[in-house]
Image (cartoon, rainbow, N blue to C red):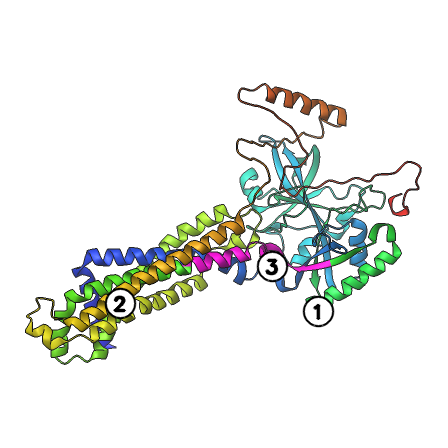
Amino acid sequence: MEALLQDLRYGFRMVRKSPGFAAVAVVTLALGIGANTAIFSVVNAVLIRPLPYPNANRLVMIWERRLPDGEQENNTSPATFLNWREHATVFEQTAACFNWTKVLTGGAAPERLNVQEVSPNFFALLGVNAALGRTLLASEDSVDGANDVVVLSFELWQRRFGFDPRIVGRNIVLNGKPQTVVGVMPRGFQFFVKHGSFGQEQPQAWLPMTFSEKDPSFHGRYLQAVGLLRPGVTLPQAQSAMTSLALSLEAQDPESMKNWTVNLVPLRTQFVGAIEPALRVLLGAVGLVLLIACANVATLLLARSNSRSHEIAIRVALGAKPWQVIRQVLTESFLLAAMGAAAGLLLARGSASALLALAPKGLIPLEGAEVDLRVLAFTAGIAVVTGLLFGVVPAVHAARGRPHEELKAGGRGGSEGAHGGRTRNSFVVAEIVLALVLLAGSGLLIRSFSRLTAVDPGFQSKGILTARVELPSSKYKDDAKISEFYAQLLERIRQLPGVRSASADAYLPFTGGIASTGVEVEGRPVAASRR
């Protein structure tokens, strides 16, 4: 231990003695280690850390799939969901949700909110309680008006209502309809699957969902369903049971269920499946960046070793063994690596924030992307590995020097000998070649990442601006009034300087919004399920 402390003290002296060299080495390592730590913090949040729900490993999304080769993840209908809830014995609970937008009025300026209509057992299934007040009750799914309640997100409570502790019991107005606030969810709570839904951002409020066979949309496929597997039930077992149930439902209602089956997707896969390949490629790319940094620092150490040959020769003449020389050089390498890791950790915290800003909205695991103990352990580990990578070759090279020739030369340099010079030069050339190869590899991986994340919209998006308009239902109650408003709006927009054309649509491209309606052919009977 005393020898190690002595090596550390000597290493600190060498750093102070060569501040320029130390600064270049530390900055180089900080960039490599910082990039790896930043990406790992995201990988940790997305692929490693458990989702923020109890029993998250038992939660699955329940989708409908059209046979033989239709889309794998289709929404389901209230009719089908109620059948699942009654007959799917592989689930402890099932819940449904539907994303929508509503306009919040009263008090401050009107505000469009993304809301989620959910079955009342939704929060119980996820295992999450309200931070203030309560969640929804089973009785609040009725259609007799007893469902005029709302649960707020913590963020909406903070931003719009200033943490008012008396918010529970107050009425807020959504789309002109009073809703009684019954609870506020914990900070950061969210559940959002961006797929075929009308609200395209994180929900800020939750309303109870009602089911009625008299509703024209009772057989419309617009719900997202989630299930909690019973303890001991595996995903293949559940998939097999739900496939059998789908066949049974098809036999009961061939008009609606013909060629429809069920597809179960684990919740983590649902949240991160689309970006997992890109993350792995990005982690590989920054890993190569770290190797490039190690190669560069190793080259610096080798180039610097000639100026230290006299110092090492004196240590050997005084009795230092080759392994002691190696230990000293490695200690200095680990010291540089530790300094680079500390600087890289600071860099990673800022980089992780930038990555979060660029991430897709609705990626729930990313909300927990931060530097935690696992990330710190990763940083410490790569610091040790980095110290070995760039320190071993210079350490061995220093220990294999010719101290007697160096002392005879009086420390003037150049006494390394032809063999030693060729060895050192070979190492330097090898390090440069390796750095070039790694640089090319990093470039290819980054190109692959760009291809994985790039989206070609199929049209020229430059110069196109979009805006969302929400009309209060209390003022615009009939279709004629709504059509008149949008016609006037588009006409005025077209008259603005610089505007070439303007149009309106129910849902913007790539927002996931869908709308469907039934079509009846004149002279043909209406299916029993649609009556």
Work out which quarter of the rendered image holds the C terminus and state it. Answer: top right
Q: Nearer the viewer, residue 92 or 495?
A: 495
Q: Is residue 61 visible?
A: yes
Residue 217 magenta-drawn?
no
> 10 Å neighbourhood of mark 1: few (<14), some, or many (≥20)?
few
Is most of the magenta stretch helix, strand or loop?
helix
**Pointer 1 residue:** 233
Q: Nearer the viewer, residue 267 or 172?
A: 267
Compared to 226, does 312 lie above or below? below
Compared to 187, does 523 lie above or below? above
- Sequence order check, earlier mark of 3 and 1: 1
Circle 3 — which element?
Answer: helix
- Which label number is shown at residue 427? 2
User: Where's residue 225, x and y in %?
Assistant: 71, 53
Residue 278 magenta-drawn?
yes
For image coordinates 44% across by 63% down, the residue present is 373
Amino acid residing under circle 3:
Arg
Compared to 165, does 229 lie above or below? below
User: Where's residue 437, x and y in %?
Assistant: 37, 60
Amino acid residing under circle 1:
Val
**Magenta stretch bounds:** 263-286
Amino acid residing under circle 2:
Phe
For image coordinates 42% across by 58% down, the residue present is 441
User: Where's residue 277, x and y in %?
Assistant: 54, 57
Quarter location, residue 51: bottom right
**Pointer 3 residue:** 268
Circle 1 — which element?
Answer: loop
CA separation, marks 1 and 2?
Answer: 58 Å
User: Where's residue 238, x and y in %?
Assistant: 73, 65
Q: Horizontal placement of 114 versus 21: left or right?
A: right
CA separation, marks 2 and 3?
Answer: 46 Å
